[in-house]
Image (tube, rainbow, N blue to C red):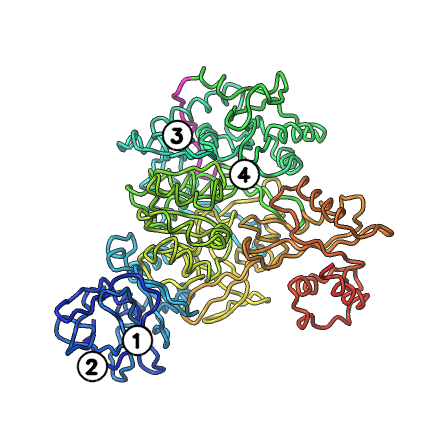
Amino acid sequence: MAGAPASSSCLATRDSPRYDYNRSRNTNLYSPLIVVAKDVSSSSSYPYSTFAYNNSFTKFKIHQNQNQPCLLYNNDTTINIGIGSSLSKSEPACLLVNFQSSNRPRSPAMADLLTNGAASSHRLRHVSSLAAPPPSRLNAVVLGDALVSEENDLVIPNPDFSAQAHVPSPAKYLDMYKRSIEDPAGFWSDIASHFYWKQKWDSPVYSENMDVSKGRINIEWFKGGITNICYNCLDANIAAGNGEKIAIYWEGNELGADATLTYNQLLHKVCQLANYLKDIGVKKGDAVVIYLPMLMELPIAMLACARIGAVHSVVFAGFSSESLSQRIVDCKPKVVLTCNAVKRGPKVIHLKDIVDVALADSAKNGTVVDVCLTYANESALTKESTKWVEGRDIWWQDILSKYPNSCDVEWVDAEDPLFLLYTSGSTGKPKGVLHTTGGYMVYTATTFKYAFDYKPSDIYWCTADCGWITGHSYVTYGPMLNGATVVVFEGAPNYPDSGRCWDIVDKYKVSIFYTAPTLVRSLMREGDEFVTRYSRKSLRVLGSVGEPINPSAWRWFFNVVGDSRCPISDTWWQTETGGFLITPLPGAWPQKPGSATFPFFGVQPVIVDEKGAELEGECSGYLCVKSSWPGAFRTLHGDHERYETTYFSAFPGYYFSGDGCRRDKDGYHWLTGRVDDVINVSGHRIGTAEVESALVSHPQCSEAAVVGVEHEVKGQGIYAFVTLVEGVPYSDDLRKSLIMTVRKQIGAFAAPDKIHWAPGLPKTRSGKIMRRILRKIASRQLDELGDTSTLAEPGVVDQLIALADS
């Protein structure tokens, strides 16, 4: 570190107290960290890189200098502090220090941490801003201290945390990132070699074509390598001596309902189910639909399928019978795995009834499923009360106990399919995203390890359901490939009250907690007392997933849940990406509340304009990725043309995420939401066409248009403009009936938040609905409607505005 300033004029004030500050003249109380360093000079500053990256916080202590508080640097140089308000002895306080010296030396820019000028490399230019000087006006708070409220906060890693982190500094990150981009084959081969392969992959390590103008889109990683992801999750960990380690802590819906499985026990249960599936004729490549709640049997079922090379398709146990039937017809499974019912909070959901209707509908559409294996979840519904189809339905517990608890592994190629997961599309038909085995295995394990700074002693809890990609990658596969202990929770986070999450955290000593901004905002509204009555001392890393987290929710998550000491991994990724693409790495660099920060290893994000031109520096546009990564999906089931059109045709040569993104002057990435016709509700991607189709199926609805609007809790809400059949009057009963139609056809999570009566819809003369105008009306941005003269019937806009609050 360059020499400290000989003197400086500083101001200290109280701000969001978090720890005691003792002003006793005879006490030299070492401050664990500089609390807040705020530079207000426009030309020269003491860069945050000097403080954060050289761990020089530990070189300062709060001291008295002739009755004046000061910061003592290296025990000899003082920085005086003028007290703006009196602080009594031992009063909790936080110091806000304004460095205003004009002759302060600067520390090296981040690029200087690299050898060979990596940050200036053309292939690395999307992180070249890391080499830029720090912001001229900096608010920095260190983990362990209260977070200030300004928009340009930087949360700097605690030096002690960084010292033990997998990636302890920007220099380490940049070194690893540089190699992952310049030598992806070598970088990922080294990581892949830590997994078990029956046979090593061929050369080259990967091949790709992401440009539709050059032929068929194709991505392959580790092709020719023979492995099995279930073996790497279970057998390999047991062989390493972790057989008696807890694999799953299961917490039931009701207080006191819980269970555990060690890795040995988990393997036995997986093998029993795998043997049963083989016995009924399920073979490598066959599809198995899983419609289960968050029982231990859900990850067991996924692993059992993987063990025998079957392709699992987990359907979120909140989807309607029609949605389930669609997925059954598309993938044509040999068997459906479900349970009779589940309790979510006080409500019983009869899952088997939903499956019965779905199987009947599927049969009408030509897909007959002969076996429905049903788990008896008698805490929700007794066997005797469960509807039953003789000859098709089998009780899980009755049959599996008859099968041996060992099962040979089906070795598969790295490019053999692992699972199908259906996600909403803008055409109304769900897309069957197909992930393969080897690259997905390597990528999910690696992202889990680094993004959460995972250690073998950690207890990890992701609140996501396995019906979504987060539950695949970061409840089951990613954690277990690392030999982690995972919490699986059946119930609702606000049952029996809004403190349930923190009760679970304390009960199992959870150290890594990964959840959605929707849940954060929901619990935030309930008040701090539901959080603060629990200890939460075990927490060390927090995570956010599913949608961009707004800065105010980020700060509450950081300050209240994490006691201002836990870094937040605000991850950006998608069903299609398999794992994190942009994410903070705890301990590596300062965070900005609400920003996903920088790309993960091997990922090259670019922001492009409407013409596909890459934008440099500070900018906003469409978020794309150039070059592939191991976890990328390979196709859409049965529809490769749609795969190419949806993801690669808009900007040839790039994977188009469908998201907007802003990159600030410091290189941090800020996700701005969907730019297509998919709404992100509570982290669930819902196609507008799906909702519109459901609404129009109502006999009294002639037309519908759906847009997304900001929602305080869910991130985005569903706002539906509905045109009724001629002569049908508006009514609250009809509004409720329309909403129930959507709930029945898609699921409760897709129910519109607002039905806006529409005598007509704003359309161009060619018949295209102008959704831009609908979004402005829905969000009440009436002064931003723009030119409406090109509409076929401009007067319809005034009619919609007049009916906005009806």
Looking at the rendered structure, the secondary structure element under dot 1 is loop
Above or below 79: residue 392:
above
Badge 2 vs badge 3, beta-carbon distance below 8 Å = no
Structural distance between the alpha carbons of marks 1 and 4: 61 Å
Residue receiving disc 1: 85
Q: Is residue 522 left or right of residue 461?
A: right
Residue 115 seen from this side: no
Structural distance between the alpha carbons of marks 2 and 3: 61 Å
Q: Amino acid at mark 2?
A: Ser
Residue 109 position within the rendered picture, expressed as x and y whole percent measured from the top left:
30, 72
Mark closest to the chain's N terminus, 1 or 4: 1
Residue receiving disc 4: 420
Q: Residues within 10 Å of mark 2 (few under 14, many from 20)?
A: few
Looking at the rendered structure, the secondary structure element under dot 4 is strand
Residue 585 position within the rendered picture, expressed as x and y whole percent measured from the top left:
35, 55
Mark closest to the chain's N terminus, 3 or 1: 1
Q: Which residues are magenta?
A: 404-418
Q: Nearer the viewer, mark 4 or mark 2?
A: 2
Residue receiving disc 3: 259
Structural distance between the alpha carbons of marks 1 and 2: 22 Å
At 54% from the left edge and 67% from the top edge, which residue is drawn?
Answer: 613
Residue 477 position within the rendered picture, expressed as x and y whole percent measured from the top left:
42, 39
Q: Amino acid at mark 3?
A: Ala
Badge 1 vs badge 2, beta-carbon distance below 8 Å = no
Q: Nearer the viewer, mark 1 or mark 4?
A: 1
Nearer-the-camera pick, 567 or 588? 567
Q: Residues within 10 Å of mark 3 (few under 14, many from 20)?
A: few
Q: Nearer the viewer, mark 3 or mark 1?
A: 1
Structural distance between the alpha carbons of marks 4 and 2: 63 Å
Structural distance between the alpha carbons of marks 3 and 4: 29 Å
